[in-house]
Amino acid sequence: QVQLVESGGGLVQAGGSLRLSCAASGRTFNRYAMGWFRQAPGKEREFVAVISRSGDSAYTGSVMGRFTISRDNAKNTVYLQMNSLKPEDTAVYYCAADERATTNSNFYTYWGQGTQVTVSS
C-alpha cells in the first residue's frame, strides 16, 4: 500500500512558477513509476508527466519545455517544476504511482488527493 500526499499548489500569475511535491509513504518508492495528472473544471483528467523507476520522463505536448518532473528516491518524493505558467494550466493536480510507467490514468493504482493550481491572467 502506498499513500501519496501532494503539496505546493496555489495561486500564481501567468508567467510565474510553482513546484509541486508528492510525498509517498512506505519503503518501496523506488519500485514505482510516478505520474502527474490534472483535471480542470468540466474536463476529464489528463496526463501531464511521468517518470519511470530509472528516471526516464515523458510529457504531454502542452507542457513540454515548461514543466519538469523529477524524483528523489531518498526522500520518497516526486516533484513537478512548473515554469511559464498559463491560465490554461489551471486545474487540480494529482500524483499517481504504479509499477508501470504509462500515460494512461486507468493503469495507476495509487492516487493522491490533489492540489489546486490556479493561474491568473
Image: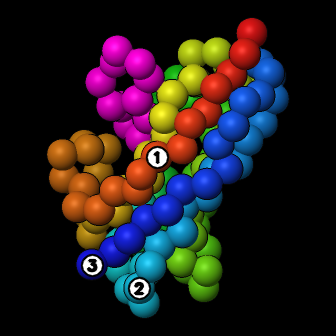
Whether label 3 touches label 2, CB < 8 Å: yes
In the image, is 53 to the left or to the right of 68? Answer: left
Q: Is residue 25 magenta?
A: no
Q: Quadrant of the N terminus?
A: bottom left
Q: Is residue 50 visible?
A: no
In the image, is 3 to the left or to the right of 114? Answer: left
The amino acid type found where label 3 is placed reads: Gln
Tell me the residue that label 2 is attached to.
26
Q: Position of residue 88 (x, y in %)?
A: 57, 16
Mark earlier in primary sequence (3, 2): 3
Q: Range of the magenta residues?
A: 36-47
Tell me the residue that label 3 is attached to.
1
| Quarter where residue 43 is shown | top left
Q: Is residue 115 visible?
A: yes
Tell me the residue that label 1 is attached to.
114
Q: Quadrant of the C terminus?
A: top right
The amino acid type found where label 1 is placed reads: Gly
Residue 108 or residue 52, whichever sits in front: 108
Q: Position of residue 98 (x, y in %)?
A: 28, 64
